[in-house]
Amino acid sequence: MIQLENISVKYGKTVALHPVSLDIKDSQFTVLLGSSGAGKSTFLRCLNLMNPLESGNIRVSGFEGSWEKRALQILRRETGMIFQQHQLIERQTALQNVLMGRLGYHSFFRTLFPLSKAEQELGLQCLKRVGLLDKALCRVDELSGGQQQRVGIARVLAQKPKTILADEPVASLDPATADKVLNLIHTICKEDGISAVVSLHQVDLAKKYGDRIIGLAAGRVVFDGQPDELSERQVEALYQNRLVDSEFARSGQLMNIPVPFVS
Ligand SMILES: Nc1ncnc2c1ncn2[C@@H]1O[C@H](COP(=O)(O)OP(=O)(O)OP(=O)(O)O)[C@@H](O)[C@H]1O
């Protein structure tokens, strides 16, 4: 469980995330929806403290407060990230990239030497799980976009995370591949009991795979509920960055919106 208490984020004078309090429950598949600039990436980066907080507190796995070096290291190790642009090392093989997921388990000096046979076998198992065992020794720049994203998923799996954070993981893929890749992430999370927070722009995929949807607009959480509770009008308002306060209020989902904005 990740508990957020009144966390907020500012970049200079820009308030990217207004104070928000909520819990991310274990084994839950949560989707973040919102238009460009709504604060989805900022929200995600707070969950593993990649973004310094302006205010508030985060509790993860029993740690909270000052987040000294050791606690932060454990948090980052237990929280895997999947990125839109994969963030792979293109000249290296799929297996070498997957083994990057193990670096958080070793000291810097240990990482200068080849990883153990057991870890290499783990890397191969992770590639097998995403259907890419036959590509283990291929350079990732020889793989398609969908295959590269599956390498990114295998790298996260090798990390053995408790939580996966995915920032628009299927934004650069065609619709059919996007569905397959998201299905893979969803299946793995459900099979392994991993909680996920995934930002998406595709409402249909959010409703298909999310146990819970969090809607963000202008750095505020404006919807927090189950997929079937999110109406078409609410989606429209979310993507127009136009918070129709009465719409959200009627649904009982209005949260933390002292000043709704209307076009
Ligand atoms: N490093 C930064 N410096 C200054 N402002 C930033 C920075 N990163 C984000 N912002 C601003 O913070 C707000 C939220 O940005 P964020 O990237 O979290 O939105 P997003 O919903 O992920 O957008 P997108 O869907 O386009 O990725 C925006 O107004 C953005 O311009």
Image (tube, rainbow, N blue to C red):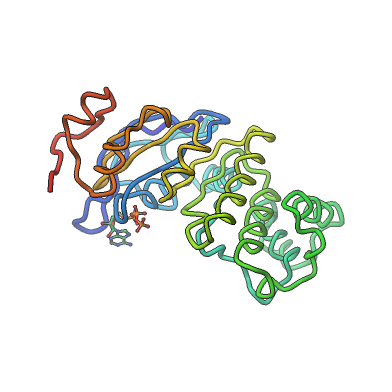
Residue in view at x 72 percent, y 59 percent: 99
Residue 15 in picture, x, y percent from top left: 22, 50
Ligand 1 quadrant in view = bottom left
Residue in view at x 41 percent, y 44 percent: 203
Name the foreground residue: 228 vs 16: 228
Name the foreground residue: 260 vs 17: 260
Residue in view at x 66 percent, y 41 percent: 188
Does residue 80 sit above or below 252 in this rendering? below
Does residue 223 sit above or below 241 in this rendering? above
Identity of the residue furthest to the bottom in this view: 91
Q: Residue 82 falls in which quadrant of the image? A: bottom right
Residue 76 in picture, x, y percent from top left: 55, 48
Does residue 24 sit above or below 203 in this rendering? above
Residue in view at x 27 percent, y 46 percent: 219
Left or right of residue 17: residue 67: right
Residue 184 in picture, x, y percent from top left: 64, 46
Left or right of residue 109: residue 222: left
Left or right of residue 176: residue 24: left
Residue 147 in picture, x, y percent from top left: 66, 62
Identity of the residue furthest to the right in this view: 117
Left or right of residue 84: residue 180: right
